[in-house]
Image (cartoon, rainbow, N blue to C red):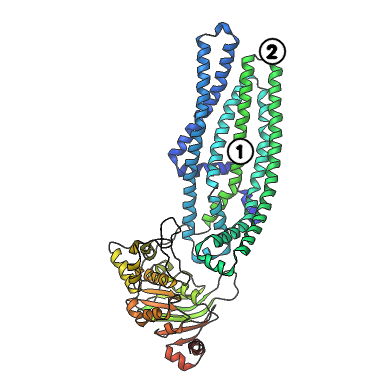
Amino acid sequence: MRLLRKAKASASTPRLIAAAAREVRRADPLGTVIAWVYLLVGATATLGVVATGKLTLDALLRPERATFGSTLSLLLLALTIAVCCALGPLQTQQDRLLGERVSQRVWDRLLDTAARADLVTFESTGFASSLERVRQHALRMPFTATASLLGLTGGLLGVATLSAVLVSVEPLLLPIVLAAGLPAVLLSRWAGRQEFPFTHRLTPLARRRDYLRQLLTERPYAAELRAFDSTGRLGDKQEDLNDDINTGLFGEFRHRRLVAAITTVGVTVALGGALLSIVELLRRGRIGLPEAGAAVIAARLLVGRLDTLVTGIGGLVESAPLFAELDRFVASVPATTPTGRKRTLTEGIALSDVTFSYPGQDRPAVDGVDIRVGAGEVVALVGENGAGKTTLAKIAAGLYAPDTGSRRWDGSVVPAADVRASVTVIFQDFVRYRLTLRDNIVISDGHRGADEDHDVEEAAKRAGLSGVTRELPEGLETMLDGQLGREGVDLSAGQWQRVVLARALYRDTGLLVLDEPAASLDPRSEYELFADVRAMLGGRAALLISHRFSSTRLADRIYVLDAGRVVECGTHDELMARAGQYAELFKLQSAAYR
């Protein structure tokens, strides 16, 4: 509720107009000037229609003067009407162009903010919900706000010029016609302010529905869903969410329909009153027929400009909370993200008495842990699921900041950004980018120079990917996964695992964090990979997380985690001799092969 009150408080129309104008101007200064020129020309042409209409009626009602002046007035009337008609499509296209530029600016702010957020913030539910709301609104908000701002400006210019015409004909006509706009403006503001809480309620439903649609339409999920015959069940859940969303939309539509009905009645009554007043003034002789005709044209055009004005105000009021949401989202993370400096690892990295808890969780995921990875060492983390291995690896890689304790690089506490720049992390749920094989490898390091080709081939060779590369139709330039419009190739799970290893080796840092690097490899491939793991690493240190003890037994040191704590540490032989938790887990796994 506090969020809604805050959003409403920030939705003042003057502030919104200023914010929208600022965003539009910054997005496209020249395009903004062109749009304003169109608006000024349109207002002048509208005034010209009224003026030339009066001149034409005056000439037609006085045949003795129907000479060159009447012909000229008719030509001017035709010209002003033609200008008004021609400006419509031009203004529409300019609005679209400006809307696209503003959309690009909004997306740049959104993406920049998302990139600056640290991992803990990004993974939080509140940040994810806010990001999703802003992302959804970013698809339409810039176009709505831009069109509304230009509509409001054009409406104000039109109302000002046409009001001057009515005042010159008969001052009493002006308040009658303007009365049509007052209830419409108030009702439009009320309806617009209902949009933000309505959208706030709808966002979680839309997120769940989008996820179900993703499951039902994307390739990675197709085989399992068909094997389980689950498409119907998920389709039913998607339909249920459709019903919930439709119920909300219908309720909102009822409100909007009521506003439209009241607005229509108000405009009809006011316009009818204005026309009757013009007739009465004509009957009493207070105005002539040319003036009456000009007044009718002005009143009709004024109502149209009032409608444009009301629509612009409504669109801006509706967009206000969304702009406020974007501003809060941008302000939710630091304004800048420090650029890390890659450091060599000459001594090692050490975590001392490190504790870390996820937001909202009572029990620490990592509790008082001490580990050390020396330069060139291979250190393994083992333990059952939920023991804290991946969380500890993220702390070592600089992705999480420990709540307590220290992380030292070569004996010194260095900025987290430097640690991230100096560590390569490959997680078990790695990303399979729908890009070329080369892009899937080089994405781990965007700062390489002229030796990129040699380094890519060397990383692929060390990861055992050379044979796969030779079999692909375009080698390193082969598109992996053809869902983005270009013919692609699907790799097996084991081949993808080697692509990810090449990605890690290409980054060329002193420490590699590998989360289940052999999870998708067959026994022969796993043996070949780890038979000479130090040659593959090329002198780099490695922090290895694995449930396969055939991999971890080659480590220089093994840490056994349980409930976020280190319960054992030593080499494979030392831990087996100790007959503790590691030995128990090793024997359980070995028994499966006997």
Q: CA distance from mark 1 to mark 2?
A: 37 Å
Residue 289 spot, x, y in % from top left: 64, 14
Q: Which mark, by number, is residue 107?
A: none
Is 257 drawn above or below residue 155 in the view shown?
A: below
Q: Residue at x 57, y 26 (%)?
A: 161
Q: In the current view of this chain or complex, which residue is farthest to the top? A: 64
Residue 21 in view, yes or no = yes
* Quarter of the image with the N terminus in it: bottom right
Q: Nearer the viewer, mark 1 or mark 2?
A: 1
- For label 2, the residue is 285
Q: Which mark, by number, is residue 311?
A: 1
Is 12 drawn above or below residue 165 in the view shown?
A: below
Pick whichever of labels 1 and 2 is earlier in the sequence. Answer: 2
Identity, as a three-letter code, of the amino acid under mark 2: Gly
Residue 546 spot, x, y in % from top left: 46, 79
Residue 135 spot, x, y in % from top left: 53, 54
Of residues 237 and 367, the one drawn nearer to the viewer in this rendering = 237
Of residues 591 and 54, the one drawn nearer to the viewer in this rendering = 591
Residue 372 spot, x, y in % from top left: 42, 80
